Amino acid sequence: MSDAPTNAACPMNRTQVVDAYFMEHRARILDLAAFLDRVDRAGPGADDFRMQAFRAAVAILGDGRTERARRVLELLSDPSTEPIAKAGMKGATGAHDPKAGKA
């Protein structure tokens, strides 16, 4: 297997990308693991929509398919196209609640 770049959009080869970014992303994975440990230590309870989306996003990361960033962003984004009259809260939740706006 050649280590030469196969995509003109990425000027580095695989080894160069790993050399440049591995340690940064290693730290991020450890941060995610620590977050999941904190959630587990908080005790039993139903996963809310954010944790359901989080676990689905983690599954995308490991599925071996391409365009993971796009697929995770779409998973976490609100797919609605119609504006709402008033937001239900002041801040963002970070994931789309499929039950939002349903009675």
Image (tube, helix red, strand yellow):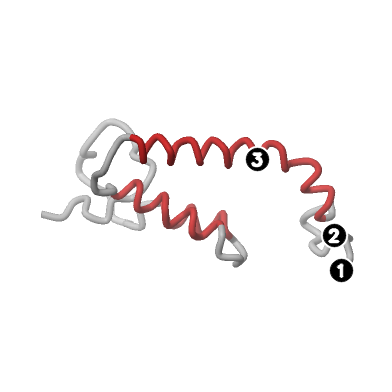
Q: CA distance from mark 3 to mark 1?
A: 25 Å
Residue that label 3 marks: 26
Q: Residue at x 83, y 52 (%)?
A: 15
Quadrant location of residue 42?
Answer: top left
Residue closest to the far left: 103
Q: Secondary structure at mark 2?
A: loop
Q: Say which quadrant the N terminus sits in.
A: bottom right
Mark 3 or mark 1: whose residue is earlier in sequence? 1
- Residue 56: x, y in percent? 42, 57
Residue that label 1 marks: 1
Along the horizontal axis of the image, is 73 left or right of 3? left
- Residue 30: x, y in percent? 57, 38
Q: Residue at x 65, y 41 (%)?
A: 25
Q: Amino acid at mark 3?
A: Arg
Residue that label 2 marks: 5
Residue closest to the far top: 90
- Residue 44: x, y in percent? 26, 43
Q: Residue at x 81, y 60 (%)?
A: 8
Q: Secondary structure at mark 1?
A: loop
